[in-house]
């Protein structure tokens, strides 16, 4: 009973971390996720520990200078997940987040290799025993990781192709928040590439969809980065 209570508490802490993350309180989110890892270790709940590591890897990959930590967190989570027989989709997600870390430190070959491995894992298909929070992850989110790699490596054409894939393949009905996030950043990317007419059209579409940015009831905010409408 005590271990089950620890499991529930760790899950609540994880969600508290995401609430802080979405509110832009990076340090609070990090503190909650550190507590999740600690409690998961005490309760011997490896899947919860992996979730905490995955969240921290995402946050580190978005922080200037956080590349090395993102790589270490993602690799640690991957090793733990593989030990527990995790579904391929989770391994794909973790490897995609590892790719962002490699790109931040300038190791472009490692980033390209990680993206290829992430695609390989995702191509293995889905499993019925996947955790609920992982339902957001698929070709669209992987494409968005590819977009970020393309931007950080200054490969504009690759970033544009991946961004288009992300916007067009995400399920806007089930994940309106992700769709909005991808659309907004796609508009910014088009602006950077000098494609202003399309950038205006895409951004207008994002503004019109802004009222749908809230995550659906029962979904997890793990799907996307903070977004202010």
Image (cartoon, rainbow, N blue to C red):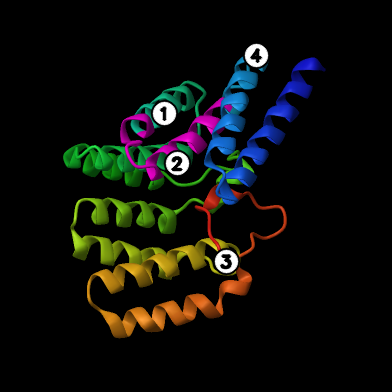
109, above or below 210, in the image:
above
Q: Residue at x 22, y 61 (%)?
A: 158
Q: Residue at x 43, y 42 (%)?
A: 93
* Magenta portion: prevailing SS class: helix
Q: To which residue does mark 2 refer? A: 58
Q: From mark 3 to mark 2, how far is it between C-alphas?
A: 20 Å
What secondary structure is marked by label 2? helix
Q: Which residues are magenta?
A: 49-70
Q: To which residue does mark 4 refer? A: 42
Q: Residue at x 48, y 35 (%)?
A: 56
Q: Quadrant of residue 107?
A: top left
Q: To which residue does mark 1 refer? A: 73
Looking at marks 4 and 1 on the same chain, the residue that comes earlier in the sequence is marked by: 4
What secondary structure is marked by label 3? helix
Binning the other alpha carbons within 10 Å of mark 1 as few (below 14), some (14 to 19) or many (20 upward) gives many
Binning the other alpha carbons within 10 Å of mark 3 as few (below 14), some (14 to 19) or many (20 upward) gives many
């Amino acid at each position: 009973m005590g271990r089950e209570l620890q499991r529930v508490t760790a899950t609540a802490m994880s969600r508290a971390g995401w609430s802080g993350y979405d509110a832009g309180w990076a340090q609070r989110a990090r503190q909650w996720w550190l507590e999740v890892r600690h409690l998961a270790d005490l309760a011997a709940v490896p899947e919860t520990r992996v979730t905490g590591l995955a969240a921290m890897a995402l946050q580190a990959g978005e922080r200037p200078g956080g590349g090395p930590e993102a790589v270490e967190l993602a690799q640690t989570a991957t090793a733990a997940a593989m030990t527990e027989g995790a579904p391929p989709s989770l391994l794909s997600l973790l490897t995609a987040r590892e790719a962002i870390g490699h790109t931040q430190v300038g190791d472009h070959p490692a980033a390209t290799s990680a993206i290829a491995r992430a695609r390989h894992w995702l191509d293995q298909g889905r499993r019925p025993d996947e955790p609920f929070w992982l339902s957001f992850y698929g070709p669209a989110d992987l494409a968005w990781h590819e977009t970020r790699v393309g931007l950080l490596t200054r490969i504009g054409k690759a970033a544009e192709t991946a961004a288009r894939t992300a916007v067009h393949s995400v399920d806007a009905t089930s994940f309106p928040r992700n769709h909005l996030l991808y659309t907004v950043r796609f508009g910014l990317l088009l602006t950077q590439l000098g494609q202003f007419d399309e950038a205006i059209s895409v951004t207008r579409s994002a503004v019109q969809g802004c009222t749908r940015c809230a995550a659906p009831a029962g979904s997890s905010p793990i799907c996307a980065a903070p977004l202010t409408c």
